[in-house]
Image (cartoon, helix red, strand yellow):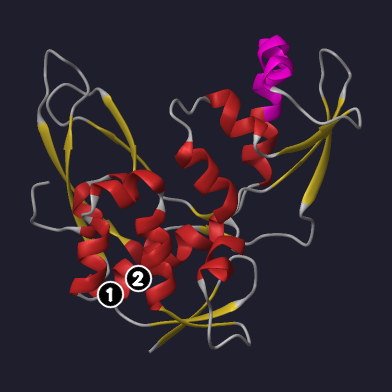
Amino acid sequence: MHVFELPSGVEVELREMTGAEEELLTNQRLIRTGDAVNQVLRNCIVRLGDNDEPVVKDVLDLLSGDRLFILVKLRQISLGDEVELELTCANPACRATNLVTIDIEELETTPYGEDREFDFTLPGSDRKVRFGYLDGHKEKRLAALKEPSISSAMLIRIIDIDGAAPSKKLMNDMSLRDRSTLRQEMLRVDAGVDTTLEVDCESCGTRIRTRLEAEPGFLFPGVRL
């Protein structure tokens, strides 16, 4: 078994993934609903803090930074430290394949602080926003949306605005300045493992931006999906 400290400070004990987890992660229906990752985490978490019989609710209660950290560590203990990726250049005139190797041990992890809710004053409207972190429950609700958007991703984290419940209309009416600064504040307080990848195309120099977990080679090295 393998023991790690989550970004939230909780200790987690993991077992390696097996063929059962690979089947879950290739089930397109379960992937769309978010249930694939939830079940994989449930299967592979042997102990969560003092809880040695974690259930799906415990997995959903985890903050998103902890959930991604566990997924990255599961990949590491199951398949090794190095991840070999084939990144396609986004430039339509190029579309070259770039071979990139990532060492999981070198990924930076930011721990969570003690706060779980944050107050922020919008610079344009001077309205007071209270928001929290994403967790598994919120991720599942986002996955269930037919057309998830930037607004919905922000809205689901907002607890209230000037003491009142937020709404889709309010988000749509919010100025770009307020939306942008609020989004930046949410990113600023977020924690967990940084899986952002930015490389320059070797053929044309175009910047390629992606996330490690979004690439097929992360969980399925050598397999073309």
Q: Is residue 88 above or below residue 40?
A: above
Q: Looking at this view, is 176 or 166 the one in front? A: 166
* CA neighbours of label 2 inside 10 A, class few (<14), some (14 to 19), many (20+): many
Question: Judging from the image, what secondary structure is the residue with disc 1 in?
Answer: loop
* Residue highlighted by disc 2: 74
- Which mark, by number, is residue 93? none
Magenta span: predominant SS is helix
Choose top left, top right, bottom left or bottom right for residue 128. Answer: top right
Q: Nearer the viewer, residue 33 or 116?
A: 33
Looking at the rendering, the stretch of residues picked out in magenta corresponds to 168-182
Q: Is residue 151 above or below residue 158?
A: above
Residue 212 appears in view: no
Give the residue type that dot 1 points to.
Met
181 in the magenta segment: yes
The reply to whether callout 2 and callout 1 are in contact (CB within 8 Å) is: yes
Q: Which residue is mark 1?
A: 17
From the top left corner, tell me how far across and down residue 4 is, in percent.
Answer: 49, 79
